[in-house]
Image (tube, helix red, strand yellow):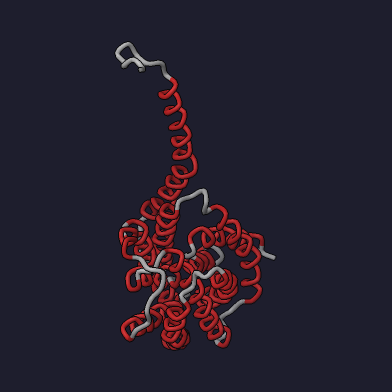
């Protein structure tokens, strides 16, 4: 058992439990940057462990009625073959570019992380304005089916190549294209992701890109982490969590670009951990203290004796 990998799995699991997204987007760059795992192995292993995690979550949401099953299945029509195709393209690129393959893959992953981080930040800051038009279910007419398949094609291919972005990309698509209520967004996203991850991970297993011992170590930490994160959600607002995660993803993307040889100033990357720390402190320490003072101030005002100019009681 690798204690460090279990610990990182725990941390990523906590974030998944609190936000519903971020598994592949966080674990893959951690395996590459911190543990020096070969990029293609990091991607395949991440998908394998993620399939197990999302299956547990998808089953839970299905039992609670928060999954739009027809929409999930129509997205899978596009995403499953696209994910398998993405793994095949990955193998072609590896054979074509040889020694340069790792750098190409790291750059591709960095670009996906940056896009995912920006979309997640946009969702946290702006898409909440769409709540008045949200709905519980989608009527799967021809237009909705085509949109679901196209969304699945894009997400599936990206996932097959990089292992990242499925949660955030699907969630943003479900909000913009189908205007689902938040609970249905999360449930439908996780249920569909479970189907997609099993297809993509199976393709990576066939290609020999999965380290099962590594996946087992991650699961030892991520499973209790998901449980812990779901409880911490009550203490930290969803908007703060999504904004925090978006900054983590953007920072990870810049760090990967730096590893690939792009000249990214160290102070730029350092800004993101500083911003994240400030947000967490504000959410867990400063805001609760301010909230605790307000009732005291209100009670003091209510109990204060009337002044000389106060009207007499009748």
Q: Which residue is at a point 58% across and 60% down the rendered structure image?
A: 8
| Side (left or right) of 38 relative to 122 | right
- Report the quarter where the N terminus lies: bottom right
Residue 181 on image: x %, y %: 40, 65
Return the residue found at the far top: 308
| Side (left or right) of 230 relative to 111 | right
Q: Is residue 180 above or below residue 71?
A: above
The number of numbered discs placed on residues in the rendered structure image is 0
Q: Tell which of 256 and 178 is nearer to you.
A: 178
Return the residue found at the far front: 314
Q: Is residue 235 visible?
A: yes
Q: Is residue 100 visible?
A: no
| Side (left or right) of 3 relative to 109 | right
Residue 125 on image: x %, y %: 33, 56
Residue 65 on image: x %, y %: 52, 70
Q: Is residue 286 above or below residue 121?
A: above
């Amino acid at each position: 058992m690798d204690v460090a990998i279990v610990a990182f799995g725990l941390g990523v699991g906590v974030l998944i439990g609190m936000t519903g997204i971020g598994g592949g987007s966080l674990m893959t760059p951690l395996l590459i940057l911190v543990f020096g795992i070969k990029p293609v192995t990091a991607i395949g292993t991440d998908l394998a462990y993620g399939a197990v995690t999302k299956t547990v979550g998808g089953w839970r949401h299905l039992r609670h009625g928060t999954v739009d099953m027809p929409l999930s299945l129509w997205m899978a029509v596009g995403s499953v073959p696209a994910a398998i195709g993405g793994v095949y393209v990955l193998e072609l690129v590896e054979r074509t570019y040889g020694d340069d393959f790792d750098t190409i893959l790291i750059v591709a992953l960095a670009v996906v992380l940056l896009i995912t981080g920006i979309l997640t930040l946009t969702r946290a800051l702006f898409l909440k304005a769409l709540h008045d038009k949200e709905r519980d279910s989608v009527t799967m007419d021809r237009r909705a089916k085509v949109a679901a398949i196209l969304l699945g094609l894009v997400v599936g291919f990206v996932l097959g190549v990089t292992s990242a972005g499925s949660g955030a990309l699907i969630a943003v698509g479900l909000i913009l294209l189908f205007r689902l209520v938040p609970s249905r967004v999360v449930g439908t996203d996780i249920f569909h992701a479970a189907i997609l991850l099993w297809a993509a991970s199976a393709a990576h297993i066939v290609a020999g890109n999965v380290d099962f011992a590594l996946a087992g170590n991650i699961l030892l930490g991520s499973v209790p982490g998901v449980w812990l994160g779901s409880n911490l959600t009550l203490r930290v607002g969803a908007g703060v969590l999504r904004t925090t995660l978006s900054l983590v993803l953007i920072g990870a993307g810049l760090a990967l670009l730096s590893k690939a040889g792009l000249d990214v100033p160290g102070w730029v990357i350092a800004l993101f951990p500083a911003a994240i720390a400030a947000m967490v402190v504000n959410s867990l320490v400063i805001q609760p203290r301010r909230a605790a003072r307000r009732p005291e101030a209100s009670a003091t005002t209510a109990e204060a004796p009337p002044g000389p100019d106060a009207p007499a009681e009748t």
